[in-house]
Structure formats: structure tokens, C-alpha cells
């Protein structure tokens, strides 16, 4: 029996009995998923039982995730602790323990920011992991900026002012220590308003940071550091055009060299993100074509990835295919390149090659059967599932397997994108009721879970 057949049983009473058994065996994710599906049914008795079962499963999941968060925190792994707490918050919303989880998450987030401000400065979160399936209608959608992500952190930072305290000074000093020596010297002896604005920026408190940087730039518009940091703030808050102007000024001083010790961040990369967010892919290709089309290694994986997106946005498909194929060879550990390459191949009507490209890309993650080393690239997996559903005839069995991998990788929490794929799978399987159930579930999700 396939994954979706197990997940969407046609007999709700039997499914509920199965969910109770799963709950008793500790399979909380599957039990809750089944119960929540039955809650949308027409039988009031089953709905009541399903609601109670879903609540019990959710509370058990909450306790389990809080225990794992505490264990990770005890071991000093703040990143893992934060991940578990964000998962716990999903279970706690609307319950008596929601505020407790939010406070714990706020504490972890502040400690993590203090321990590794570099993550806030040059986040490497994969673009394209949210929103609609980029192979399924989003076309030339540009990537989300890699700056500090307000969606992940804005809700956990509240109040507080930079007053020269040890914590704030530590945050500022940690940030400076992550910069390359040549750049770090430009941050020494900066006045308190600048330090305050920078700490606010790296904590995700963008309104306070923006007000501070606006005042500072008004007083000294030629300062490249001020323009760089105001540009980062603007980019994080969606002011792409203004950010691009700031990065143009900063580029004159900092050039193409990395800003940080890790070599991840540069002004060209930030400028390119801003240009793409502003919808100006033409400017990106015009400015970067000479070095990058000659050899993707002339930049770095981050900038090369953005350049590949620009080529796709402009539908320069042959160039995109050739460039992304070269980039995939140059940077074999960057999953975005085969993902974008498959997008170019599909647009060129080479769908079989796109499927082969994505199968090869996810194979290292799934070779052991658990898709955990390296982590499964979810955008590639979703795109591959959709391509299999597009085939004539559709490969329902392989799509079913891929959706099961997504389910496991997301710890049982489907995004709306996944549920829409499930709806299509059920429809192609002749299960209209299951398709409608999946569509309703997708519509019920909040926009941030799309």
C-alpha cells in the first residue's frame, strides 16, 4: 500500500481506529495527520472523536519536542534547540503553553544571535524552499534575500534598547569578529547610535534599525559602511530598489572581495539579490555575464546561483542550461544548481532530462533510505514529484514515494504546496474525495505555510 493510500484512507471510522492504534504505539505524527483529516468529515460523532484524538496527539508532540529542545540546549546546540522550539510552537498555538514556548524561543534566539551573529549577517538558507512549486507556475520568481529572515525571528524579539550592556557589546563584538580584517577595521570606534542600529538589524528588529540608519546616512551619506548596513536593512524589509542604490555606493569602496572571514558574503552578492528582488534581471546579467559565463568559479556558489536565476528569469534558456550544468560540476555540494538546471531543461521541453537531473540530485540523500545525509533538498523533491505527475501516463508510484520522503523530512507537517501535489495525485488516482480533502487542507493553512 502506497504512502498516500495509508495517509488518506477512504473509511473514516477505520482510519480513526487506525489513528488510535498509531497514537498508542507512539506514532504521533501519523495519528494527528489522520485525525485532522477526519475532522473535516460530515459525521459529527467521528468529528468529535477525531478532534479529541488530534488534541491528544498534538499535546504529546508538544511535550516530545520540548523535551528534545531541552536536551539540545543542555548539549549546547542552540540551533537544534531553536528548531525544536519552533516545531513546538506549531503544536502550542492556541494552548495554555503557547506563551511559555514563545519565551523559551526568545531566549534561545537571543543566545544564538550572541553566539553566532555571522548567521544573521550572511544566512545561507536555501532559496525557493517556501511558496508555490517553482516548476509549477511561478516562472521567473526571484529568490528570497539571504539576509536575516524576519519570518523566522521577528516574533521572538521584543523590546529592549542598546545601552552599552555586556550582552549588546558582545553582540556587536561578535559581529565584528566575523568580518574580514580589512573590513572589520571600518567598524571600530563607531558611535553608539550605529552600534545600536547594527544590533537591532542583526536581531531582526528592522523598524528600530531602519530609523537609526536613516538618521546616520542623512548625516553622512558618503560613508560606505553606513550605506552597506542601511542596504542590508532595506533588503531585509523589501525595499529592494533603495537597497540596490546603497550597495552601488558600497561596491565602490569594498569591491568584489568577501566581507566576512568565511568568504560567503560580498557586496556584488547583496547588490544582485537587491536587483533580482527589484525585478531587474537584465541588469544582473549585463553586469555579471563576462566573468560568470566564462567560468562559474569566477564568483562563488551564492553569486553563481543568483546569476543562474537571472538567466532563467530572462528565459535565456540555452545559456542557463549550459551555465547551470557547469556550475553543478563546479559546486557539487550546492543542491540549488541541479534544481535550477532541471527548471531550464523542463522549459526547453527536455522533461526526461529534468527528471534524471533531479533523481541524481536527491540520490545521495536517499541512498541510505532515510534521506538525512546530506539533508533532502525539498524544492528538488517537490519538483520531481510534480514532473512525475505530469508524465503520460503519470508515474503515481514514484510520486507517492517522493511525497512520503517530504512528509518524513518535514516531520509530518505538509506545506500547502505539498498538499496541492497530494490533491493532484489523488485526483489522478481516481480518488476525488481524497483530492478535495487535500485541497481543503491546503486552503486552511496560513499563508506562511504555503
Image (cartoon, rainbow, N blue to C red):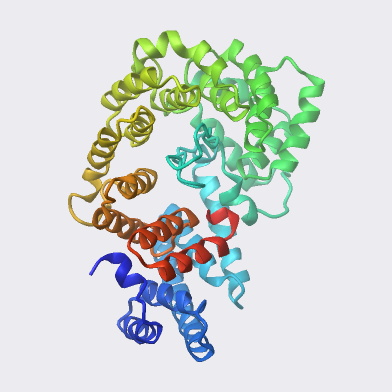
Q: Quadrant of the N terminus?
A: bottom left
Q: Please, which residue is most extreme toward the left here?
A: 368
Where is residue 85? Give x, y as percent.
Answer: 49, 63
Locate residue 244: give its quadrant.
top right
Percent position (x, y) of residue 146?
Answer: 52, 36
Question: Which residue appears at 29% of the width and 54% of the height?
Answer: 399
Q: Is residue 230 left or right of residue 115?
A: right
Q: Is residue 411 left or right of residue 117?
A: left
Residue 55: image x %, image y %? 50, 81
Left or right: 39 in relation to 23 = right
Q: Nearer the viewer, residue 135 or 170?
A: 135
Name the residue: 22% across, 50% down: 366
Q: Tell me the quarter of the picture where residue 430 sits.
A: bottom left
| Residue 372 on image: x %, y % | 28, 52
Q: Please tell me which residue lies in front, 134 or 70.
A: 134
Number of marks drawn: 0
Could one spot residue 189 in this view of the protein? no
Classify residue 234 as left or right of residue 177. Answer: right
Residue 412 in view:
yes
In the rendered image of this protein, does residue 123 appear above or below residue 48? above
The residue positioned farthest toward the bottom in the image shown: 45
Q: Nearer the viewer, residue 330 or 140?
A: 140
Identify which residue, 302 or 418, lies in the foreground: 418
Q: Determine the residue located farthest toward the top in the rendered image.
A: 290
At x 33% / y 44%, what residue is drawn? 387
The vertical placement of 30 against 248, above or below, is below
Amino acid at each position: 500500500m502506497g504512502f498516500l493510500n495509508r495517509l488518506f484512507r477512504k473509511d473514516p471510522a477505520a482510519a480513526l481506529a487506525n489513528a488510535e492504534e498509531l497514537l498508542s504505539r507512539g506514532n504521533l505524527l501519523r495519528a494527528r495527520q489522520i485525525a485532522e483529516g477526519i475532522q473535516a468529515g460530515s459525521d459529527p460523532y467521528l468529528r468529535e472523536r477525531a478532534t479529541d484524538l488530534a488534541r491528544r496527539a498534538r499535546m504529546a508532540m508538544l511535550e516530545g519536542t520540548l523535551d528534545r529542545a531541552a536536551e539540545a540546549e543542555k548539549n549546547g546546540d542552540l540551533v537544534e534547540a531553536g528548531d525544536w522550539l519552533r516545531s513546538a510552537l506549531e503544536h502550542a498555538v492556541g494552548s495554555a503553553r503557547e506563551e511559555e514556548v514563545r519565551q523559551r524561543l526568545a531566549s534561545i534566539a537571543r543566545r544564538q544571535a550572541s553566539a553566532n551573529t555571522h548567521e544573521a549577517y550572511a544566512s545561507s538558507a536555501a532559496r525557493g524552499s517556501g511558496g508555490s512549486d517553482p516548476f509549477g507556475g511561478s516562472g521567473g520568481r526571484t529568490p528570497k534575500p539571504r539576509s536575516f529572515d524576519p519570518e523566522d525571528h521577528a516574533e521572538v524579539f521584543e523590546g529592549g534598547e542598546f545601552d552599552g550592556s555586556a550582552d549588546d557589546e558582545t553582540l556587536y563584538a561578535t559581529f565584528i569578529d566575523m568580518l574580514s580584517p580589512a573590513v572589520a577595521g571600518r567598524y571600530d570606534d563607531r558611535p553608539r547610535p550605529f552600534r545600536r542600529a547594527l544590533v537591532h538589524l542583526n536581531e531582526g528588529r528592522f523598524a528600530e534599525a531602519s530609523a537609526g540608519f536613516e538618521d546616520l546616512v542623512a548625516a553622512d551619506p558618503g560613508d560606505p559602511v553606513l550605506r552597506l548596513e542601511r542596504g542590508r536593512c532595506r533588503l531585509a524589509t523589501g525595499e529592494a530598489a533603495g537597497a540596490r542604490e546603497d550597495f552601488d555606493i558600497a561596491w565602490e569602496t569594498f569591491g568584489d572581495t568577501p566581507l566576512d572571514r568565511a568568504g560567503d558574503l560580498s557586496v556584488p552578492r547583496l547588490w544582485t539579490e537587491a536587483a533580482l528582488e527589484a525585478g531587474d534581471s537584465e541588469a544582473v546579467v549585463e553586469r555579471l555575464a563576462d566573468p560568470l559565463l566564462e567560468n562559474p568559479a569566477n564568483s562563488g556558489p551564492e553569486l553563481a546561483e543568483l546569476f543562474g536565476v537571472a538567466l532563467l528569469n530572462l528565459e535565456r534558456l540555452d545559456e542557463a542550461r549550459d551555465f547551470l550544468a557547469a556550475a553543478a560540476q563546479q559546486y557539487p555540494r550546492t543542491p540549488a544548481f541541479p534544481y535550477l538546471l532541471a527548471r531550464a531543461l523542463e522549459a526547453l521541453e527536455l522533461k526526461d532530462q529534468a527528471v534524471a537531473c533531479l533523481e541524481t540530485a536527491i540520490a545521495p540523500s536517499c541512498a541510505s533510505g532515510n534521506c538525512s545525509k546530506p539533508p533532502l533538498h525539498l524544492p528538488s523533491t517537490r519538483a520531481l514529484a510534480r514532473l512525475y505527475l505530469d508524465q503520460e501516463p503519470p508515474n503515481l508510484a514514484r510520486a507517492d514515494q517522493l511525497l512520503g520522503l517530504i512528509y518524513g523530512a518535514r516531520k509530518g507537517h505538509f506545506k500547502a504546496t505539498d498538499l496541492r501535489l497530494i490533491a493532484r495525485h489523488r485526483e489522478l488516482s481516481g480518488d476525488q474525495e481524497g483530492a478535495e480533502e487535500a485541497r481543503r487542507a491546503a486552503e486552511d493553512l496560513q499563508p506562511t505555510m504555503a
